[in-house]
Image (cartoon, rainbow, N blue to C red):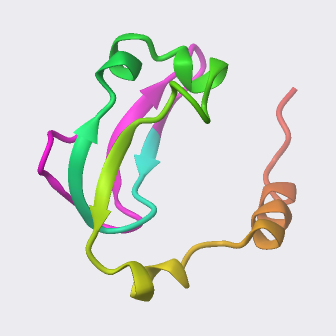
């Protein structure tokens, strides 16, 4: 994870998350300055799975170009279509 007040850039990795089977990059959805890191999640990564919309948040950023970058993100329908194209692992 980046440190507080670090600059992150849209679509660039800012950290990793590790599971038993893989290590995956965490990719920034928007560019900006990191205002706060969730230390609790760093010490208890299981929160990412157990409570991703509550205690499992990773960081708070102050976006630097929200209007310009929001249009670069996938909407729900595009994300579902993209996910359907991923290989399914059993």
Left or right side of 3 for 25: right
Image position, residue 55 (x, y; %): 51, 24
Q: Does residue 76 lie above or below 64 as drawn?
A: above
Q: Residue at x 85, y 41 (%)?
A: 88
Q: Residue at x 57, y 30 (%)?
A: 54
Image position, residue 34 (x, y; %): 22, 51
Left or right side of 22 for 33: left
Q: Does residue 46 lie above or below 31 as drawn?
A: above
Left or right side of 64 for 56: right
For the magenta stretch, what is the residue range?
1-24
Q: Does residue 56 lie above or below 62 as drawn?
A: above
Q: Does residue 74 lie above or below 89 as drawn?
A: below
Classify the position of the N terminus by image quarter. top left
Residue 1 seen anywhere in this rendered image of the structure: no
The part of the image, by quadrant, that contains residue 47 is top right
Image position, residue 35 (x, y; %): 21, 48
* Front-most of residues 47 and 12: 47
Does the segment drawn in magenta span residue 13? yes
Left or right side of 88 for 60: left
Classify the position of the C terminus by image quarter. top right
The part of the image, by quadrant, that contains residue 30 is bottom left
Residue 36 seen anywhere in this rendered image of the structure: yes
Residue farthest bottom in this picture: 68
Image position, residue 84 (x, y; %): 87, 57
Does the segment drawn in magenta span residue 35? no
């Amino acid at each position: 994870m980046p440190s507080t007040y670090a600059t992150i850039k849209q679509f660039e990795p800012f950290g990793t998350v590790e599971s038993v089977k893989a290590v995956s990059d965490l990719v920034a959805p928007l560019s900006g300055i990191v205002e706060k890191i969730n230390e609790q999640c760093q010490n208890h990564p299981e929160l990412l799975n157990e409570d991703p919309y509550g205690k499992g948040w990773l960081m708070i950023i102050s976006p630097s170009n929200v209007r310009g970058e929001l249009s670069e993100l996938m909407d729900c329908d595009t994300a579902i279509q993209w996910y359907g194209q991923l290989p399914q692992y059993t």
